[in-house]
Amino acid sequence: MSSIPKITAEIVQKKNLTPELWILWLKPSQKFEWQPGQYCTLGFEGTERPYSICSAPSEGIVELFLEVVPENLKTERSLTPKLLELDVGTHIEMRAHAKGRFLVDKTCTTRVMVATVTGIAPFISMIRAHMEGYYGECKKPFYIFQGVSYMDEFGYEEELKRYHAKGKVYYVPTVSRPQEPRNKAWRGEIGRVNEILDRYFKKLAIQPI
């Protein structure tokens, strides 16, 4: 049985959003290709785990949006907490090929993306690629709805608002706990993301298949 080809990747940057949420940037040791929506598999000290890629294929650097598993659910095999303890400049293992079939169907004319917190990761890759013309001419914007409990959990809100302003993305962020002190500055949509979809689908004339 042949071994799985692997390369290494250097941690080149880390950004802490909250105690539980991080953005991590990796530089592969050799050419690493992926399609928007695919994932990479990282390894450290004998533990491997797949992570959805946020960056567009043109970027070269692999960007990840990570959530640390709650303390009561951590085990010796939990990889994310170990990765976030590593210093910039550390090299870790990476499988040499990206995987995954969670890709944009180019035959569809209406693209709706719904996510909570880090679930937005593969959509960020798709949207960045879309902004570069990766999917050709699109008559409609990419619709993206993202729900979080707290406003500091969005991660990519400002970036998506810039794309929204250009008309190529229609972005709706929503907070499910508006009464919490942590959300006192929030002035946007409120409610769970699944609860606002019907209203927006009617408003935007989106017809689910």
Image (cartoon, rainbow, N blue to C red):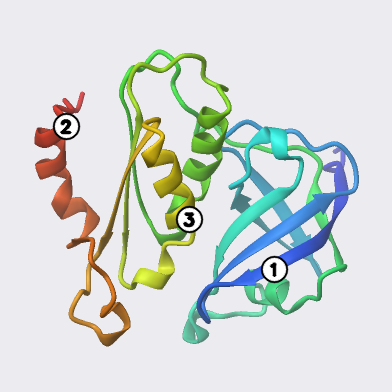
Residue 151 in the image: above or below residue 35:
below
Residue 137 in picture, x, y percent from top left: 46, 14
Find residue 14 and name its label: 1
Circle 1 — which element? strand
Which amino acid, mark 2? Leu
Residue 123 in picture, x, y percent from top left: 47, 42
Q: Residues within 10 Å of mark 2 (few under 14, many from 20)?
A: few
Image quadrant where one finds the N terminus = top right
Task: Name the residue carrying label 2.
Answer: 204
Q: Earlier in the sequence, mark 1 or mark 3?
A: 1
Find residue 101 and name its label: none
Which amino acid, mark 1? Lys
Image quadrant where one finds the C terminus = top left
Q: Are marks 1 and 2 in contact (CB under 8 Å)?
A: no
Left or right: 18 as drawn, with respect to 171: right
Q: Earlier in the sequence, mark 2 or mark 3?
A: 3
From the viewer's side, name the closer residue of 205 and 209: 205
Q: Earlier in the sequence, mark 1 or mark 2?
A: 1
Circle 2 — which element? helix
Q: Residues within 10 Å of mark 3 (few under 14, many from 20)?
A: some
Residue 206 in the image: above or below residue 85:
above
Which residue is found at the position 86% from the left and 41% from the top? 5
Q: Are marks 1 and 3 in contact (CB under 8 Å)?
A: no
Which residue is found at the position 80% from the left and 63% from the top? 11
Task: Name the residue carrying label 3.
Answer: 156
Residue 183 in picture, x, y percent from top left: 28, 77
Which residue is found at the position 57% from the left and 64% from the top? 66
